[in-house]
Image (tube, grey):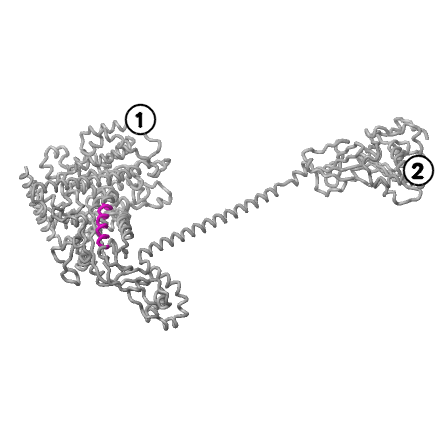
Amino acid sequence: GLPVPQNESYYIPQPLEQSFVEEEDDYTHYLPLWQTYPTPRSVDSINRNLVEFYTINRLLHHLVETGEPALSKLFVPCLDQVCPPESFYGPILPSTDDNGDHGTQPHIMLMQPITQNFDDHAHEYGKDEKHHEERHVDQENNPVVAIIVGIFQFDAYLQNVLHEGANGVEAVVKNSCGDIATYLLNGPEAVLVDGLQDTHTSDYERYKQVMEFEPFPWHEGEDDESDVNCHYEIEVYPTTVIYEKYHTNKPAMLTLGVVIVFAFTCLVFFVYDRFVQMRQEKVLDTAQRSNAIVASLFPAEVRKRLMYGKDRKDKSKSKKSSILMNTRPAEGPKFRLNNFLNESNVAGGEATSNATPATQADVDKKGMVDAPIADLFPNTTVLFADIAGFTAWASVREPTQVFTLLETVYSAFDSIAKRRRVFKVETIGDCYVAVTGLPEARDDHAVLMAKFARECLTKMSEVTGKLEVTLGPETGELAMRFGLHSGPVTAGVLRGEKSRFQLFGDTVNTAARMESNGIKNKIHCSTETAEELIRLGKEKWIEKREDMIEAKGKGKLQTYWILSREQSRKASGDSLHGGSSHGSISGASMGDEDLENVVHSPESLQIIQHIRRVEADAKNERLARWITDLLVVSLKEMMAARPESGPSAKDKEAVVALENTISSFSITPLDEIPAFVPLPKFEEDVVARSIDDIKLDPRVEEQVFKYVMAIGSLYRDNPFHNFEHCSHVAMSVRKLLSRIVSPENPIHDGKQIDLRLSVDDNTYGITSDKMAQFAVIFGALIHDVDHRGIPNFVLGKEDPNMATKYKGKAIAEQRSVDLAWSILMSHEYKQLRECIYTTREELHRFRQLVVNTVLATDIFDPDLGKNRKDRWNRAFGEDKASAEEAITLDDVSRKSTIVVEHLIQASDVAHTMQHWQVYVKWNERLFQEMYAAYKEGRTEKDPSEGWFKGELWFFDNYVLPLTKKLEQCQVFGVSSDEYYNYAKQNRHEWETRGHQMVEDFKKRFEQRQKKKEQELALFKYSE
């Protein structure tokens, strides 16, 4: 055929560079259109030779030459919306849809050969080089006689690959001939993207999937032509749409969750393991503590015996009858002592069992199933040691202070006992019980116990001297009484709910009698113990007691003193016989009997006076350090409640100005007494700090001590109104402050309100008012400064100028305020003042609190008394209690002021509301002071004449009503009941014994006066 001319009416698109063959030689085959199926509908072009078309021509040549099927390059039938007529392509051109898009889609053409023999192995050729060559040879014998031409488009091929809803997949069609087409697959649809190019998103290159498109075998590089027999691949990529839809962090989250669960599980196991470890440590610690407790209760042999019996309890039950039948005879005490727990025989094991019967009824009928753990120890020495004056001392202290003393003293004794192999039996109250000679027999049991008692006596003096700084006055005056007795005892474990190792027998009772009839700071022993000491060559250790004692159930007994090491070393009598290392602030460490035995010369008098001065100075210093500690702690609490920012320069100037103003006052402290002292302004933004966070300048602590010592030096050597009494008042103040009850839920009318305005705040702001607490301790320190030992009305007669200055009211108290304040205002206490108050308002309030506190101790001035009574009725009276009116800050301030007044008043006469011995001690001292004034002619009336009735009147009209007021204000908890009970008991005791005690007071006063006169005569003689 001839070439088909190219004209506009018969234009064929050229997507593959050309559409028609240009050389006539290419028309070697004839492929008429009418041979196609289905047959064309138009007859105008049924003889049209399809070989004229370039693509068909190239494929046909390849097919004829190789005998193998071939795929064409991509071609587009229609370009620019111009498509060949049906007569040209016939029915092989896919029909267009409504939009006419099929003609513009890339197509490929597949040409499959049909051989003459219609063999069916054409597809096998091309699998390797051998078959490829065979196909060329066979071509002559079995030539291609027909072809099948198929045209299809990739959009149709890619349709329905994805299901509905699966969108966003890009399919890139590539062939070895260099053609590229990109399709976007959204559900069942496939759409060509931006012509014939690769437009997939490079971000998802790592997700590429490649699929071969091979309808027949193909060999790479078998044909050098670039437009015939193209090899196709389809590359599939996700798009952002499908990536965002299917990309998830669930695996990571799941992994993280697994890790967290694993970590949490590990943490749980770690915490559990830690708790188990802590529990084991706690159990071990408890076991160690229990072992320590058991060790302190039972001797080593008894402990082992108890454990051994417990372990064998179950085993012994099944063998009980046979065991009892084969029990060996009981061994002697000595053998059992040495082999307490090492008995290997069955009978011994059964005997040591600690089992108890199943029911109480069995106990009632038969007693304990097992034999008791008990033995007789024929050679022992038992010690009873008691703290003399402990009960009276403890009545003044807080419970924690009482236990501090007992724990410290008896821990020291325990250490000595452990070192000397003395067995501590128990402590009963303040009584310490120990024994030697068991569980191991010792021939020197009496010597061992004597050494133990002597060392404990020295240790007691050392410990109490140190504790006086922390536990307050009179602690250093505590002393031990020791009682020893030697003889046989029955010892064993008294079983029951709380088993204890106990001693029984007459030896124990006699040892207790030795202690109760002893004297403090001495070791009292029986004749039996003295004989044991003499037998062992220690006759110099003992001294026969001059008087015989009356022992309950024993009659009169001759007893002995075991001397201290120093006393036993001295062969001559130049030592101070029976001396004590404990003294008091108003007297020497020497007792009355000591003075009679020693004062025979001016030299001995000088020695005694020197000892008295040294001991008094040492005691005053201990008391001063104790009060210093009280003030420093209270000062830190006050500083901790303030803002951390500190005062401004303006505040400091205002403080200095007010200090100068107060010092130049022409009015008296009495004129400064307010109706009430206002509570400080509540600052919500101020967070109270711990006193541990307060670092006090060392200069301040030094100034506090120096100030206390200066105040102490102003106290006169009165029997009652002295520095020791000031310390006793300070101790009572501390005790009452520690007993203040704090509210838990301050509410008013159902609303949370300021703590100090709450009706339920029984402390009326005192708990949070640290300045008030400091001021009342400060007031206790200064309230009797320079007291002259006489009442105010007598003082006014002796010093008319002073009476005029203070208007004849509360003369001693006002003078105390002025003296103490003038010392505080001196330059050497500048840093101390800066800690007490930082603003003008704080200085003014501190001054009011001090004045009000000190003047409250004048309880006999009728005008001041009436004033306080009116204020009490206004604050706590029945009218106020029943009135339904709003609680104001002034109401709370008034109650706070009155409570502080009653606190210092109760502390000032606290001896009347404490143990009987404390009351007698201070009552006698007050009597001595008043009687001395009478004897000196300073007062007209003999106090001894009305002292008995006066004390009863004082109890009925002041002390007991005061305790009731303490209870009524509901601030001091159980202290109000404690004070009331002591006051009642003391009144009853005074009513019973008061007459005789007044006579005794007078007698002892006369004796002291006589001795003072003797000393004075000796002193004048020495001059």
- Name which residue lies at 35% across and 46% down: 744
Amino acid at the residue labelled 1: Lys
Quarter where residue 132 is shown: top right
Residue 289 position within the rendered picture, expressed as x and y whole percent measured from the top left? 36, 53
Side (left or right) of 140 relative to 958: right
Residue at the image point whose x is 90% and y is 45% from the top = 119
The amino acid at mark 2 is: Trp
Query: Quick one: SS at disc 2?
Result: helix
- Depth check, front residue: 190 or 135: 135
Neighbours of disc 2 within 10 Å: few (<14), some (14-19), many (20+): some
Question: On the picture, is 1010 further left or further right than 721?
Answer: left
In the rendered image, is residue 956 in sight?
Answer: no
Q: What is the magenta segment's predominant secondary structure?
A: helix
Corner quadrant of residue 554 = bottom left
Helix, strand or loop at mark 1: helix
Q: Position of residue 429 (x, y in %)?
A: 25, 54
Residue 928 quadrant: top left
Q: Residue 34, which numbered label?
A: 2
Label 1 or label 2, whichever comes before in sequence order: 2
The image shows residue 153 at horizontal and vertical percentages of 81, 37
Residue 199, how many percent across, how many down? 73, 32
For the point 92% across and 36% down, the residue is 33
Q: Which mark is residue 79?
A: none
Locate the N terminus by quadrant: top right
* Residue 1010 visible somewhere in the drawing: yes
Magenta range: 448-464
Residue to which mark 1 is pinned: 650
Q: How many residues crowd mark 1 within 10 Å: few (<14), some (14–19), many (20+)?
A: few
Real-space Cα separation, disc 1 to disc 2, in angstroms: 121 Å
Which of 742 and 343 lies nearest the eye of the viewer? 343
Residue most extreme to the front = 537
